[in-house]
Image (cartoon, helix red, strand yellow):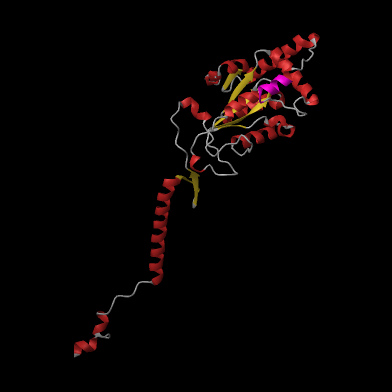
Amino acid sequence: MADDDLCCFPKDSFLGKAPKKSPLLLRMVVVVLLMACSLYISSVCLKQVGIVSVNSPGIIKIVEKHCPVPNIEPWEIPYVHYPKPKMYSRAECECSPVRYFAILSMQRSGSGWFETLLNNHTNISSNGEIFSVKIRRRNVSTIVETLDRVFNLDWLSSASKNECTAAVGFKWMLNQGVMQHPDEVVEYFRTRGVSAIFLFRRNRLRRMISVLANEYDREAKLLNGTHKSHVHSPHEAEILARYKPLINTTLLIHNLKQVENITAQALEYFKSTRHMILYYEDIVKNHTVSREPFHQQM
């Protein structure tokens, strides 16, 4: 009994349960575990859809997945593009490569006929003489804006194809802003990977006659009271051929030389771009002449 009296606490107090852990601590542990699991799952998912880059703590930026490099020559890679139109989705053709081109020519050189040949292909869209509208070539900014719309597949015309377009371009007359802003246009072609297709006529005299005849028909409207820059049948061609324009022989040599100089100057401006030189007469004789390789940058 004496021993029991010396103890101030009951025996059961030494055999009691351990004190309970703080609920707040347990909650914090659970939250930390959940955050860790979430970050792990997110990182795995992001690796599957694209590249993850962290610009600053707590900010994760998702870079869209790049399309695989097509099986082409290394030097051709800069001329293969994957545009993303703002007006529609390319859907399953999102990773189908697209090539950009511009037909640089002069009026009455066969560019309309050549463009028709191109547009006969299911996946080629050549959108016509888009810079015939003056406001589009008013300055460098409007020219670049127009080019961006065309090559981003946001330019809608009768030549526009489906989402799987493989090549897109237009025809650009040399007197429609090209020669006025050559440095800026060349730089655009080089940096954006645009291929230039030059189309000229070897017989400059015939081109001059065609120009004069076309100007006359604008007023005369020989085809049932309508003017057509391009005929679509031998009968229409025969009617227009009846007109025999008068040529000023005094200015003939000067005018032909002027055309020759403009042609040479354009080729000089674009010699540093990827380009091809075609002649109307050669294509008429042999349609496969357009399969000649491009001249690469110098």
At x 69%, y 35%, the residue is: 142
Provide residue 199's location: percent of width, then percent of height: 63, 20
- 251 lies above or below 11: above
Q: Residue furthest bottom?
A: 1
Nearest the camera: 227 or 125? Answer: 227
Nearest the camera: 257 or 122? Answer: 122
At x 52%, y 29%, the residue is: 78
**Magenta stretch: residue 213 in it?**
no
On-image quarter of the N terminus: bottom left
Q: Main secondary structure of the magenta part?
A: helix
Count numbered badges in the picture: 0
Nearest the camera: 1 or 289? Answer: 289
- 286 lies above or below 152: above
On-image quarter of the C terminus: top right
Provide residue 53's location: percent of width, then percent of height: 47, 45
Rendered image quadrant of residue 88: top right
Provide residue 140's location: percent of width, then percent of height: 69, 31
Provide the residue span drawn in magenta.
232-239
Q: Is residue 41 visible?
A: yes
For this view, does 4 lie left or right of residue 106?
left
Q: Is residue 298 visible?
A: no
Rendered image quadrant of residue 70: top left
At x 46%, y 26%, the residue is: 74
Provide residue 292's location: percent of width, then percent of height: 53, 19
Rendered image quadrant of residue 210: top right
**Magenta stretch: residue 236 in it?**
yes
